[in-house]
Image (spheres, rainbow, N blue to C red):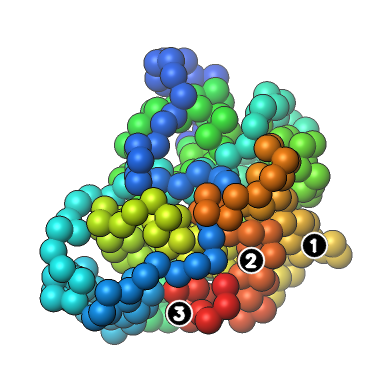
Amino acid sequence: MRWKGRRRSRNVNDMRGQGGLGGGGMFRIPSGGGFRIPTGGTVRPARSGGFGCGTLIIIGVVLWLLGLNPLAILGGLLNGGLGGGLGGGLGPAISPQQSPQVNRETGTGGRPDEMREFMEVVMASTEDTWDRIFRAYGKEYPHPRLNIFEGQIRSACGLASSASGPFYCPQDSEVYIDLSFYQTLARQFGAKGDFAQAYVLAHEVGHHVQNQIGVLPEFNRMRQSMGKLEVNQLSVQVELQADCLAGVWGHFVEREGWLERGDLEEALVAAQQIGDDAIQKRTQGYVVPEAFNHGTSQQRQKWFARGFDAGRIEACDTFNARDL
């Protein structure tokens, strides 16, 4: 990537080397409260009449684009079409890209200051991309904050360790990452390169976009009445949409001359290596599709590529796609 010398975001908080960020224990996501790799599935939740899950979320996006309040209107649809009892706040962490045995070395192997600069530049590029897209709809894009940590950190979603991988916390609208994840991504998963690293960050920012347009709030409300399998199935759609939104970001940086030969392949390899099926095969030797919640390698590649090719948020309708 041609990233050096470009604008750097001011919304990056480097917390490495700061002690007292949390007590012992691993970050734990309560049942039904978040996403972990591996997860996913391709079977859609059963519908019981009225509006289906995908329809509700897409209606929310359309209402947002029209300047209406999707949560207020969707609340009535949920109560009338699917029954009550779906109340509740946002869940804890969204999409920790979990990896076993996190390597404690710095990011890409470069100097810590250079790695922080890289993250600031990538974060700035996501701000510029989504500022432009939101303005096209007459909306303002609230910038999320990126927190770089090492070891463990407390967020509004709880105590996280480096083993949790990068994650987005909707309760504070912030992204968290231990840069050692990138060493794990390269050495254990074979996904190398700066564009692969940028894709991971853009995916988490994609969750922030979902949070702003009402997708995450509605998902977190609806999953409280679902069983585990249904939650996993809908989670796949949420995660694949975040991959597609990362692809939309990639479309814009490609147009602005950021990418070099091989960069796109780096992102596609990363998407392949962190697919639910690939991780399950690597960690346990067999695949359990019912446990998927991020999508298969093929699905993650497909939806990133779709966003990259289209460069439009409308291309990321994973909820009504006939074939994920």
Q: CA distance from mark 2 to mark 3?
A: 15 Å
Dot 3 surroundings within 10 Å: few (below 14), some, or many (20 or more)?
some
User: What kind of residue is marked 1?
Assistant: Glu
The local secondary structure at tag 1 comes to helix
The local secondary structure at tag 2 comes to helix
Q: Position of residue 25 (x, y in %)?
A: 44, 19
User: What kind of residue is marked 3?
Assistant: Asn
**Is residue 318 among what the camera can see?**
yes
Q: CA distance from mark 2 to mark 1?
A: 15 Å
Question: Reading the chain from its start, which is encountered first: label 2 or label 1?
Answer: 1
Q: Position of residue 124 (x, y in %)?
A: 55, 55
The local secondary structure at tag 3 comes to loop
Q: Is residue 193 left or right of residue 44?
A: right
Which of discs 1 and 3 lies nearer the camera? The answer is: 3
Question: Reading the chain from its start, which is encountered first: label 1 or label 3?
Answer: 1
Q: Residue 265, which numbered label? A: 1
Q: Residue 320, which numbered label? A: 3
| Relative vertical location of residue 201 with respect to residue 150 in this rendering, above or below | below
Q: Position of residue 304 (x, y in %)?
A: 63, 67
Displayed quadrant of residue 297: bottom right
Residue shown at the point (72%, 40%) measured from the top left:
285
| Relative vertical location of residue 199 with respect to residue 49 in this rendering, above or below | above
Front-lying residue, 201 or 2: 201
Q: Position of residue 165 (x, y in %)?
A: 56, 38
Q: CA distance from mark 1 to mark 3?
A: 27 Å
Dot 2 surroundings within 10 Å: few (below 14), some, or many (20 or more)?
many
User: Circle 2 sits on which residue?
Assistant: 299
Quadrant in which the N terminus is drawn: bottom right
Q: Is residue 13 left or right of residue 192?
A: left
Front-lying residue, 268 or 223: 223
